[in-house]
Image (tube, rainbow, N blue to C red):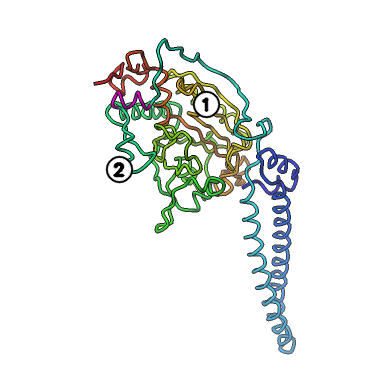
């Protein structure tokens, strides 16, 4: 949720944010009206409750004759209080609905527009030039015994797969390297649950425009997570954190599940868009004034991981319309995929400011001991999709693939070859 005080003071900024996202700026006025109605309802109910309390004191001091009329007035007042409290409850519900309809306020400097309107910040490394026709990741994966899509489909359906042999070790190596790097950088490793309650999923903002992507177990009313950002965001829900020593940093290792609704016919080959994958995700709670610097740190740690697997990549500033409802700013790192002759997302890091913290009631105490809403951030440190870029960029003419030096201790081989 966005800050109502900010909304009242700078409604034009919020309207501009909505327009930058390609969303309805009229929702700002709906929320302003709901906020005003709720404040009026609260004031009316408070006034009547105060009057009722004062009347109760009068009854105790009144003479028998006066008490009869006061009690009669008290019954009328009690009915008015109940009516006012019902109106207050309804106004609170309408305010909550209106507030949840608005996405986070886009950070100043983020580009406006949709998916193709990103700003290129940097290109790192040289794209490989092969003196042979390169194979795509699936052809390499199948020929080297790393990926089995056919049996994945037989067992679970389209967009499922088996990672086999050194393919499994390659993924485990990527995630283990990410876990080691995260721990060295002060993150606490977590293996979180992958099923969460509706209030946790809603609290992170994923039940809005991303609801179609999520698997829901209706009988249990639980959701399968698409990222460990969700359980990590809920980890401290309803709590007051001690951030006096700096941000709280967690790294979650989990399987992730996405329906990939609306992507039929797009990236159906191989493991670029699949229904299940594994990921190490960074998640941070911090003071709002520290969030921008922390966002840059997350990007830096992502870049270090990409350097470790030795793939060329670019960094983009994601446009407002492609941020997702919770993020105020997002940077993606996209690796070069030789057979597609384009860059594809490998990491994403988002500054969600206080949007999730407000929904999940995650707070900290300021220097005066007053509770304030905490900011949250997230960022990818490694995921299954990285295998795509790794195989394609490190392939050799004989069909083998060089294993990056940083992964050799985990994989146990310097070169992956057909058996």
Depicted 245 relative to depicted 40: above or below: above
Q: Nearest the camera: 227 or 393?
A: 393
Residue contact between numbered discs 2 and 1, judged by CB atoms under 8 Å: no
User: To which residue does mark 2 refer?
Assistant: 155
Q: What kind of secondary structure does the magenta stretch mostly adopt?
A: helix
Residue visible at 62% across and 33% down in the picture: 319
Q: Nearest the camera: 382 or 357?
A: 382
Q: Which residues are magenta?
A: 138-145
Depicted 40 relative to depicted 298: above or below: below
Near mark 1 (Cα within 10 A), the count class, few <14, some 14-19 or many ≥20, is many
- Please provide percent x and percent y for residue 211: 52, 48
User: To which residue does mark 1 refer?
Assistant: 333
Q: Is residue 195 left or right of residue 315?
A: left
Depicted 78 relative to depicted 43: above or below: below
Q: Which of label 2 and label 1 is nearer to you?
A: 2
- Please provide percent x and percent y for residue 128: 46, 14
């Amino acid at each position: 949720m966005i800050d109502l005080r900010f909304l009242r003071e700078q409604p034009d900024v919020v309207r501009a944010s909505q327009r930058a996202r390609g969303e309805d700026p009229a929702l700002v006025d709906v929320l302003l009206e709901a906020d005003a109605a709720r404040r009026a309802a609260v004031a009316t109910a408070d006034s009547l409750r105060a009057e009722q309390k004062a009347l109760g004191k009068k009854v105790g001091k009144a003479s028998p004759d006066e008490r009869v009329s006061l009690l009669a007035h008290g019954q009328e007042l009690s009915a008015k209080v109940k009516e006012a409290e019902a109106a207050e409850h309804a106004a609170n519900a309408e305010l909550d609905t209106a507030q949840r309809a608005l996405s986070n306020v886009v950070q100043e400097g983020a580009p406006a527009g949709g998916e193709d309107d990103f700003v290129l910040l940097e290109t790192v490394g040289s794209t490989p030039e092969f003196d042979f026709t390169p194979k795509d990741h699936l052809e390499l994966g199948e020929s080297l015994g790393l990926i089995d899509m056919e049996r994945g489909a037989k067992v679970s359906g389209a967009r499922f797969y088996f990672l086999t042999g050194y393919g499994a070790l390659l993924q485990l190596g990527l995630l283990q390297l990410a876990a080691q790097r995260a721990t060295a950088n002060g993150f606490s490793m977590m293996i979180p649950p992958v099923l969460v309650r509706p209030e946790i999923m809603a609290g992170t903002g994923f039940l809005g425009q991303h609801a179609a992507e999520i698997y829901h177990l209706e009988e249990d009313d639980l959701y399968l997570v698409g990222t460990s950002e969700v359980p990590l965001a809920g980890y401290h829900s309803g709590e007051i954190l001690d951030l006096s020593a700096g941000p709280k940093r967690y790294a979650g290792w989990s399987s992730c599940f996405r329906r990939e609704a609306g992507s039929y016919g797009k990236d159906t080959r191989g493991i670029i868009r699949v229904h299940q994958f594994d990921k190490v995700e960074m998640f941070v709670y911090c003071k709002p004034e520290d969030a921008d610097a922390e966002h840059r740190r997350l990007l830096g740690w992502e870049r270090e991981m990409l350097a470790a697997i030795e793939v060329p990549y670019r960094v983009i500033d994601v446009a407002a319309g492609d941020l997702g409802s919770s993020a105020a700013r997002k940077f993606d790192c996209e690796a070069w995929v030789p057979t597609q002759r384009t860059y594809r997302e490998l990491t994403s890091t988002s500054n969600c400011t206080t949007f999730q913290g407000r929904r999940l009631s995650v707070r900290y105490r300021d220097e005066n001991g007053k509770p304030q809403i905490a900011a949250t951030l997230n960022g990818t440190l490694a995921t299954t999709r990285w295998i795509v870029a790794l195989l394609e960029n490190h392939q050799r003419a004989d069909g083998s693939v060089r294993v990056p030096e940083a992964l050799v201790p985990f994989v146990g081989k310097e070169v992956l070859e057909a058996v």
